[in-house]
């Protein structure tokens, strides 16, 4: 290809590198070309520190350099790769907020501490946290605000953790094109039980968005953060041949010594979205993190979750509920790394599969050589509700210390006919009995949410998906 | 004259249920650690080329179709990359140019023990093939390097119509029986090492069990590698015709050598309607051997294939016995025990491909990592679309002895449809400290206690082995556990 290009352009001696890469729009670059990136960078506020732009440039270079996932990539085993496209989306340069934009608040909680709502990477609405807490150092803000007021926070924590689950290319893409996102900073010793709700909305069709949420809990802090990803369905009823919307999100959760974080996310992208979400959690000494991801939307959704237990006493609870229907594909990859002794992790991922949907769960527990007394658990349960759905499970272990308790389990089965029969003998109609059993299946995960309002809101989202 | 009599006391009559004072007493640790200067009548030299393949085929006086098969396989071998995108990089250390692909002392398998040359007998004596085994087992096809040095099929088995020959004889004398299935269960291109085996194979057992024949005693073969840098590429094909039953056992020991040797076998099993095949392997390769084996069986309607696979020793073992469940109600089972000591990597597992309704499969894997040993379980369970009522149960337990021992588990399970039940469980643990404490209180040393605990860990699986093998296995474990504590 390069040879061809040089022949075509042989009369132009000043053939710049930039125009060359845009001339050669390859499948591994798509619309996210050097030109698109320059436009994005030009639209960044002039106040942005030099290191921020340098990081973005390095990330874009890495994105260009890395190939698309190949057939032999173990991290993409069983994933559909032919549908991973980078073409056909508009990389909208960030502008000011659209004049009259309204997005449905999918998760509304009476006791929310603060809310942030982004549309296509631009903050459009916020309710502030109580001034008293802000005065004590709480930050519920945006990346752009933090860049000018507390750049050191981003410098230390923004996308600072390694990408180990196969999406290095998409992580680089995220860093390069991220415009704005949420930053939540809870200072040492501050405990806030009311949830902070961040809504990442997209206009859907044609858009490419890069949502980001950064949560930093200092020592002994406590907080609950909720991420909601939503976009409106476009042209309902029109069959989609390829994804027409693109989301490439990431979050960084940093939980300091003895801090406690509850993180819940609901992904309800439109059904024509190609979605990547790359999550990273750092758990320090005696810290506790509970994260729950609810997956309902997108036509193809890749979700990576890395949990690093870096100091003794750390505990990471990783939960997920997925309802896969139609021809959706949910591809979930997890990694629990125990880097210090006396750490604990507990993973429970539940998938319900309908129609011709596919799910992939690939989880790995890694116990480093010195991480004695590790207690790690990993469980994937697939409920098959259709004869044409397909579930793949790859539960893995890599253990390099001997004084550990590590177990994993994976099951795939249908609704227990005996349970169904029992409910029917009690006069419950088959359809209702089925529904009860399916929701019972999810309840085991949702029950672990302590916040009742959140539990109800997530359950309602699942129910609306079923009817 | 009985050349084996002096070994009797060393190898038999160790009661397994009675705790002995020192489980490792009486085991000559140098067993298997020796070599004889054997004069080979045919030697293909080192390195792999078309010439090597033609040489092997000529020496074996093979039909032209078989030569073509080998040459095509060689091309496939060259074209396939090393599977290091998922497997260990250690594979890159195999130097295919330094390996001798074929050695033989002669072409005629010996029929009686007396005909076996004296120096080969000495080798077997050191290995300790107990005389009892010869008495009880139906036939012994002991493979000394490439060709069968000793072959004695009991009259009863022959009278039942069972054919038990080496690969060369099988493809020359009984092509009508074996050619139909040869290379069909594991095609040449299945993986790089099945291609290599297809190009240079020699030795191995071909068995045909006629309809309805139930072979009462296990058939057995004993393999070992002798010449340094010599790859052993045996090929086994067992066909159990409708309603027949057969158990096959193979054991492997090899002398220790300073440079790497390669063992790469292909084993194909065919269980026709209602047939049962049990294939038992107990191996103890020297710690410099690359043991890369492809094993797969096809089970037709109501048939059953059971792999019992025990891997001790070798530098790297990669072996994932599989069953393709092709007929309704077929059953597949893999029982796997692996022990990885310092510098060893046991990468073992199982593959279950469900291809018919109501098929069931079971995988039970237990691994022990000692010192810096690494054991890996890799499994695949596949239940494709439009099948009904399939079941799989997988259990993997790993035991870690020392603080720096390592274990990995990489299963892959794909299920399509809503009428199946699949379950996978795995756990990793260390030896219970209280158990060790209790045993030490009763006067056992820590090492003895550890050895007993490890034997206890695998005991429920070992009990499924035939007596001779369970005794041998226990001794091997004791030997491996020596020096692992303290």
Image (cartoon, rainbow, N blue to C red):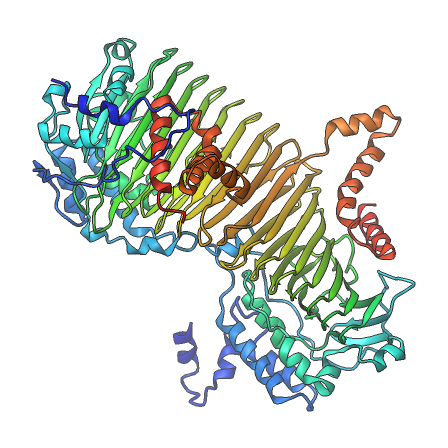
Residue B187 visible in the displayed image = no
Q: Quadrant of residue B23?
A: top left
**Vertical placement of B421 versus B97: above or below?**
above
Q: Residue at x 83, y 50 (%)?
A: A459
B313 or B145, which lies in front? Answer: B313
Residue B338 visible in the displayed image = yes
Q: Position of residue A188 (x, y in %)?
A: 75, 75
Q: Quadrant of the N terminus of chain B?
A: top left
Q: Residue at x 65, y 60 (%)?
A: A313
Q: Is residue B106 left or right of residue B70?
A: left
Q: Position of residue B293 (x, y in %)?
A: 34, 40
**Vertical placement of A10 versus A403: above or below?**
below
A76 or B288, which lies in front? Answer: B288
Q: Is residue B287 left or right of residue A270?
A: left
Q: Position of residue A63 (x, y in %)?
A: 54, 72
B243 or A445, which lies in front? Answer: A445
Q: Position of residue B339 (x, y in %)?
A: 40, 41
Task: Give the mark count.
Answer: 0
Q: Quadrant of residue A180?
A: bottom right
A422 or B369, which lies in front? Answer: B369
Q: Residue at x 41, y 35 (%)?
A: B321
Q: Residue furthest right?
A: A110
């Amino acid at each position: 290809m390069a040879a061809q290009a040089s022949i075509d352009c042989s009369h132009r001696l000043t053939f710049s590198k930039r125009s060359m890469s845009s001339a050669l729009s390859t499948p591994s670059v798509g619309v996210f070309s050097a030109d698109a990136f320059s436009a994005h960078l030009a639209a960044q506020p002039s106040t942005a520190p030099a290191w921020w732009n340098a990081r973005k440039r390095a990330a874009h270079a890495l994105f260009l350099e890395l190939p698309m996932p190949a057939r032999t990539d173990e991290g993409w085993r069983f994933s559909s790769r032919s549908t991973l496209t980078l073409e056909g989306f508009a990389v909208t340069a960030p502008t000011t907020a659209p004049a009259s934009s309204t997005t449905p608040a999918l998760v509304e909680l009476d006791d929310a501490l603060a809310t942030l709502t982004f549309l296509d990477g631009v903050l459009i609405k916020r309710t502030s946290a109580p001034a008293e807490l802000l005065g004590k150092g709480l930050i519920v803000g945006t990346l752009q605000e933090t860049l000018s007021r507390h750049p050191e926070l981003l410098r230390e924590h923004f996308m600072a953790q390694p990408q180990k689950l196969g999406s290095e290319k998409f992580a680089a893409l995220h860093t390069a094109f991220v415009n704005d996102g949420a930053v939540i900073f809870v200072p040492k010793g501050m405990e806030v039980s009311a949830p902070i709700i961040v809504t990442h909305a997209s206009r859907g069709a044609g858009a490419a968005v890069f949502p980001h949420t950064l949560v930093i809990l200092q020592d002994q802090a406590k907080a609950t953060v909720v991420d909601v990803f939503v976009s409106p369905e476009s042209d309902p009823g029109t069959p989609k041949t390829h994804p027409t919307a693109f989301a490439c999100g990431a979050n960084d959760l940093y939980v300091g010594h003895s801090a406690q974080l509850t993180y819940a996310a609901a992904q309800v992208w439109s059904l024509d979205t190609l979605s990547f979400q790359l999550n990273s959690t750092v758990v320090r000494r005696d810290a506790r993190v509970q994260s729950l991801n609810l997956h309902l939307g997108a036509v193809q959704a890749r979700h990576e979750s890395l949990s690093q237990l870096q100091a003794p006493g750390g505990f990471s609870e990783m939960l997920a509920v997925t309802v896969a229907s139609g021809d959706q594909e949910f591809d979930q990859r997890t990694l629990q790394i125990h880097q210090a002794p006396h750490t604990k992790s507990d993973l429970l991922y539940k998938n319900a599969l309908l129609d011709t949907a596919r799910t992939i769960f690939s989880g790995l527990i890694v116990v480093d050589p010195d991480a004695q007394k590790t207690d790690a658990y990993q469980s994937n349960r697939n409920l098959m509700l259709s004869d044409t759905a397909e579930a793949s499970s790859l539960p893995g272990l890599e253990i390099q210390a001997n004084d550990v308790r590590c177990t994993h389990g994976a099951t795939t089965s249908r609704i227990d006919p005996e349970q169904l029969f029992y409910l029917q003998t009690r006069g419950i109609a088959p359809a209702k009995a089925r529904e009860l059993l399916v929701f019972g299946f999810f309840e085991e995960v949702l029950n672990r949410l302590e916040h009742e309002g959140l539990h109800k809101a997530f359950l309602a989202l699942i129910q609306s998906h079923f009817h | 004259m009985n050349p084996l009599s002096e070994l009797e006391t060393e190898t038999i009559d160790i009661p397994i249920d009675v705790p002995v004072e020192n489980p490792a007493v009486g085991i000559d640790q140098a067993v298997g650690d020796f070599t004889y200067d054997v004069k080979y009548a045919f030697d293909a030299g080192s390195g792999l080329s078309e010439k090597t393949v033609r040489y092997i085929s000529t020496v074996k006086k093979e039909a032209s179709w078989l030569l073509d098969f080998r040459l095509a396989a060689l091309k496939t071998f060259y074209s396939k990359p090393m599977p290091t995108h998922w497997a260990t990089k250690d594979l890159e250390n195999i130097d295919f140019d330094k390996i001798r692909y074929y050695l033989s002392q002669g072409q005629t398998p010996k029929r009686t023990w007396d005909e076996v040359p004296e120096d080969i007998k000495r080798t077997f004596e050191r290995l300790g093939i107990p005389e009892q085994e010869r008495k009880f087992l139906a036939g012994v096809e002991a493979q000394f390097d490439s060709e069968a040095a000793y072959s004695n099929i009991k009259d009863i088995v022959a009278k039942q119509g069972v054919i038990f020959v080496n690969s060369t004889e099988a493809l020359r004398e009984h092509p009508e029986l074996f050619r139909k299935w040869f290379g069909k269960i594991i095609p040449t291109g299945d993986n790089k090492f099945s291609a290599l085996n297809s190009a240079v194979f020699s030795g191995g057992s071909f068995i045909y069990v006629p309809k309805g024949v139930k072979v009462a005693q296990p058939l057995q073969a004993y393999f070992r590698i002798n010449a340094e840098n010599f790859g052993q590429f045996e090929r086994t094909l067992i066909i159990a015709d409708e309603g027949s039953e057969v158990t096959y056992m193979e054991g492997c020991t090899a002398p220790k050598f300073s440079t790497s040797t390669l063992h790469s076998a292909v084993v194909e099993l065919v269980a026709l309607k209602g047939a049962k095949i049990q294939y038992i392997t107990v191996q103890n390769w020297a710690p410099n051997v690359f043991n890369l084996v492809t094993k797969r069986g096809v089970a037709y309607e109501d048939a059953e294939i059971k792999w019992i696979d025990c891997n001790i020793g070798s530098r790297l073992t990669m072996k994932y016995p599989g069953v393709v469940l092709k007929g309704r109600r077929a059953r597949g089972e893999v029982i796997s025990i692996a022990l990885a000591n310092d510098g060893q990597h046991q990468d073992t597992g199982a593959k279950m491909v469900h291809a018919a309704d109501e098929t069931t499969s079971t995988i039970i894997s237990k691994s022990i990592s000692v010192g810096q040993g690494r054991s890996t379980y890799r499994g695949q369970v596949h239940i494709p679309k439009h099948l009904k009522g399939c079941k799989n149960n997988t259990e993997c337990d790993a035991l870690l002895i020392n603080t720096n021992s390592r274990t990995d588990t990489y299963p892959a399970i794909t299920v399509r449809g809503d009428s199946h039940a699949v379950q996978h469980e795995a756990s990793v643990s260390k030896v219970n400290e209280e158990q060790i404490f209790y045993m030490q209180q009763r006067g056992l040393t820590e090492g003895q206690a550890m050895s007993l605990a490890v034997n206890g860990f695998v005991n429920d699986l070992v009990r499924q082995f035939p007596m001779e093998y369970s005794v041998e296995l226990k001794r091997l474990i004791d030997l491996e556990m020596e020096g692992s504590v303290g």
